[in-house]
Image: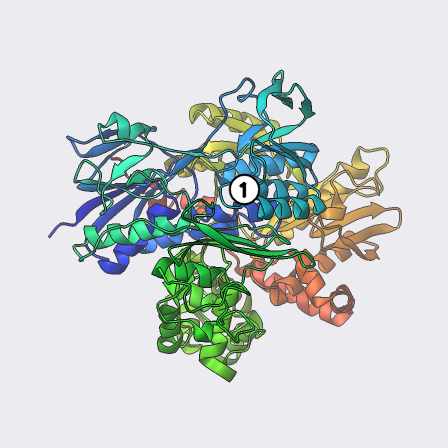
Amino acid sequence: MSKTKLLMVGNGMAGVRTIEEILDRDPDRFDITIIGKEPYPNYNRIMLSNILQNKMTVEETIMNPYEWYEARHIRLITGDKVVKIDREAQQVETEQGQVVDYDQMIIATGSDAFILPIDGSRLEGVVGFRTIDDTEKMLEVAKTKKKAIVIGGGLLGLECARGLVEQGMDVTVVHLAEWLMEVQLDRRAGELLKKDLEKQGLRFELQANTQEIIGDKQVEGIRLSDGRVLDADMVVMAVGIRPVTKEARAAGLDIGRGIIVDDFMQTSDPKIYAVGECAEHRSKVYGLVAPLYEQGKVLADHITGRPTEGYQGSTTFTSLKVSGCDLFSAGRITENDDIRGIEMFNGIDNIYKKVFVQDHAIVGAVLYGDTEEGNRFYNMMKKGETIDDYTLVSILHKAGEVDAMNVAEMDDDETICGCNGVSKGKIVSAIQEQGLTSVAEVTSVTKAGNSCGKCKGQIAELLEHTLGDGFVANAPTGICACTDLSRDQIVTQIRAKGLKTSKEVRHVLDFKNKGGCPKCRPALNYYLNMVYPTEHEDEKASRFANERYHANIQKDGTFSVIPQMRGGVTDADQLIRLGEVAKQYDVPLVKVTGSQRIGLYGVNKEDLPAVWEALGMRSASAYAKKTRSVKSCVGKEFCRFGTQYTTRLGIRLEATFEYIDTPHKFKMGVSGCPRSCVESGVKDFGVIGVENGFQIYVGGNGGTTVEVAEHLTTVPTEDDVIKLCGAYMQYYRETANYAERTAPWLRRLGFDQVKAVVLDPEKQQELYDRIMIAKAAVEQEPWHDIVKNERKQKIFEVEKV
């Protein structure tokens, strides 16, 4: 029996969670295709502000990596947008001309950031705050510019503004209302929030209406309605969102503010559903994650034939992800003839609590400074519990109580994770039935804590209450949720037990998930390659996509081709070939890279083998956790300040250590004099030529957090540099955690410890000998083999629809 073709239009949090719910109920029912306009797998949009605040990386926001889709046989199309829905033919057409059929379709196109329709809104430097690309634009501007204005003092605007302060910018928030977050907070809470944020460096213009954005091509400032001008290098619009309904409207579906759906998330076409921020249910559009996930569960029940009462709407809550500002808001927070408030303010500690009551039941709550009781109030609201049994003197504590209700006293049906709708009972059952012992494991199994993360403290309390002495809050965590074993414990067991494959490691060491996860699979493959360089057969399926394709995936789904140019040296023949290939394959960008190479950007996946064959050049490892390029200046050969032949040494270093796997990328630089034109002082291994030899620097890197390398030693000859580099790299390979750069590794082990090991003559020789064994075993330049092997070219084929 053929499967039903299910098409998901949208690859965001609501859509992918709905697919997860469907697969949980009936994994074999549908042949699933997902189309997303962004060039990424599903990521946690809630955590974008954490990237700005230097708390997370882009990679850490990914909720469903590419491997997740592959493992579930989901066809994923990224970097492409549905532009036409043909309901009669039951197919959609994308911007890039792909046509996809469906039997049933779910629209989860979400929302776009609302950009104020004022003069100047299209200037360079005006951005929304909605996507990874928006976030990366802001980070890029923050590197060179200083003044930012955020228009909008709501939740998103404040998180963004605080992040830009963290990036070193001078930030002013311009807000139309009398106080911040006026939809979620009352006046007093809004004023407390403003004072705390001002202490953190933010400035505010309240009751301020932006009339115009000023500038020629680039933003220079804004003009307010009172005539004042505020200077700015960047303007961030955080004034709301607008449901994406254009294609649904053109297809003739019923549209209000969003795509109108019934209680089963079904649109006016019974074959089409809508879920998330683009859907309008009972005249309401939701923009918070908890109701969107509730909608996904109902839709999954209905589409798989399970009984469901349907979606009845949601009670929503809000919390702010800014350190030093704890707030919680839920429900209706405006007093009137029917709704009255019970208020407590502690002016000494700046703690404010107010609950809103109608007919003896809580209908809303605002907490600032102490939010521990937020979940309790939220659960009382959801259950319609009256306040009759509570004393009102200390904000709804039962008579005789001193502290807030702890998790032990909560009923099993009370919600712990509001974002994902996970109850105390579900978490306790998972802990007891599946032997969970850490917050990470609970999150992996139940999804509690997987969105905003505010409930992780209560999850830890539940673990402690459920397990008693079996839970140690500060116990070292494992390399992933599949195991409690640390990196050192795993490597020790690999050596001691002679484990030779990742599968063997997971079974013998009793991983909870015997199939592994996207975090442990590449890590185990690396550790096995490191321990058994000549015996372990590389598990290519465990590698990240860039390493499987031997190319970097770009934001639009195309790839970059970076040929090797050791020492940044090329010749006329190579340049001619690069130009000819770029013309032949209509390459949109040919660029000199920051690593002294020439890259072809925008190459289609299916063209990669042919492009490499036409080039006839070796690949640089510009895409992998390996030895990267070795930058070098012209040195003594041409420069009048040069003291050493640095180009020659750079070429030797790259040739000696190329293609060797490392825990993370490993960059090197060789400068001919202390002027250090190639920035050797911010490289993992930096060399600076001086009159009496070569100064060696280690543990540096550029990036969002610049790390200055430390001076290790000075050696007299090129051979000494090569040997010391090999010893240092091998010690890093043998002792670092997978995905750990040399800077944090050096801090963790201690500079003096590393120095003592790699400068000890006997240990240095042993380490160098081991890395030479690894070099001899490593797979050489991959494309030379791929272009001659049709079987290996299969992964580059693209299905034509």
The residue sitting at the front extreme is 337
Most extreme residue toward the right, as rendered?
691
- Residue toward you, 219 or 458: 458
Query: Circle 1 is placed at which residue position?
Result: 181
Left or right of 281 in this view: 491: right
**What's the residue type where badge 1 is placed?**
Met
Q: Secondary structure at mark 1?
A: loop
Choose top left, top right, bottom left or bottom right for residue 90: top left
Q: Nearer the viewer, residue 290 or 480?
A: 290
Q: Is residue 606 above or below residue 759?
A: above
For residue 531, what is the image quadrant? Answer: bottom right
Where residue 741 appears, as percent x and y from the top left, is 63, 56
Comparing 16 with 409, the one in front is 409
Question: Can residue 517 be seen at all in this image of the molecule?
Answer: no
Percent of width and height locating residue 687: 76, 49
* Percent position of residue 545, x then y: 44, 49
Using the image, determine if residue 218 lies above or below residue 540.
above
Question: In the image, is residue 406 above or below residue 89?
Answer: below
Q: Position of residue 49 (x, y in %)?
A: 55, 45
Which residue is pictured at 60% across the width and 18% down the height?
A: 217
* Residue 368 located left or right of residue 112: right
Is residue 4 among the parts visible in the rendering?
yes
Mark 1 neighbour class, 10 Å CA radius: few under 14, some 14 to 19, many 20 or more: many
Label tally = 1
At 58% from the left edge and 40% from the top edge, which residue is drawn?
180
Q: Residue at x 48, y 80 (%)?
A: 497
Is 321 on the left or on the right of 544, as rendered?
right
Question: Where's the C terminus, which quadrant?
Answer: top left
Q: Residue furthest top?
A: 216
